[in-house]
Amino acid sequence: MATAPAAPTVEAERHGPVAVIAIARPEVRNAVDPATAAALLAAFAAAEADPEVKALVLTGRGGQFCAGADLKAVAGGAPFAREAPMGPSWLVPGRGLDKPLIAAVEGNAVAGGLELALLADMRVASDTAVFGVYCRRWGVPLIDGGTVRLPRVIGQGRAMDMILTGRAVDADEAYAWGLANRRAPAGQALDAAIALGQEIARFPQLCLQLDRRSAFDGWSRDLHDALVEEGRTGRAALAEAAAGAARFRDGAGRGGDFGSI
């Protein structure tokens, strides 16, 4: 009798201009093994290459975001990649992550799962969300962006609190710190993240992409160089800006209205 093919550990679906990428290993709290890491990277590449996709959402099935690397696989000698073992975690704007990414977090986003959440531009956290460097207990280092991105998102002092203690940070504290950008009731983080992605997709895209890229690139430049580069790259959107100014002149968007853009 033929063996049934294994269920995919990463699922992709479309909601209009928003691509949802979901880790589907709920039996291990969506822990990532080498095959899942490769599938995640492939799903990101496919979404980035699709011109109809304007925003991405990363989530996990079964009420959990991601518990990090699959330590049973690690202990068993599974061949994780030397670079970015969680899959897409080393992607950056200009190198494979050129569309806005939102993490929809239910349950645990811990260890490597925290690092995947930090890959996102924004995080929508449900009331059940928990963030933490849980790998601190086992001597497993942060090598998927955690020591780089976490201080940039929440500041050095708060990042060191999480990195050195490994403690749990619940949704309330995460929101107060800016680790979570939006809140949602339990079970509704994905819907809220999709709605946020669809909102972003409505805007003129060239200007949005250039501003997003500049906000990331500025970290690697001194202030003067960052300002010069912002002005230089932003000029590519002036035609789009002129069209938007004409719409405003003709009556659209008055009084801060976003409904007629």
Image (cartoon, rainbow, N blue to C red):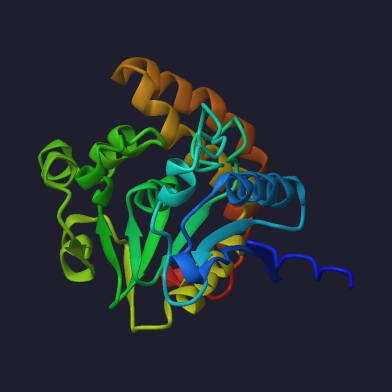
The number of numbered badges drawn on the structure is: 0
- The location of residue 243, given as percent across then percent down, is 66, 51
- In this view, 21 is above or below 47: below
What is the x, y in percent for residue 137?
A: 20, 46
Residue nearest the viewer, comparing 254 with 148: 148
Q: Residue at x 61, y 50 (%)?
A: 40
Q: What residue is rendered at 69% in x and 68% in y?
A: 13
- Position of residue 224 in the picture relative to residue 104 (left or right): left
Q: Looking at the picture, how far across and down is residue 246, in whole percent? A: 63, 55
Residue at image position (43%, 19%) is 228
Residue 122 figure quarter = bottom left
Look at the image and tell me in which quarter the N terminus lies: bottom right
Give percent across and percent down for residue 152. 27, 38
Using the image as rendered, state which of residue 169 and residue 253 is in the foreground.
169
Return the residue found at the far front. Answer: 1
Left or right, 252 with respect to 174, comes to: right
Can you name the residue that lies furthest to the right here? 1
Above or below residue 92? Residue 169 is below
Quadrant where the image shows the C terminus: bottom right
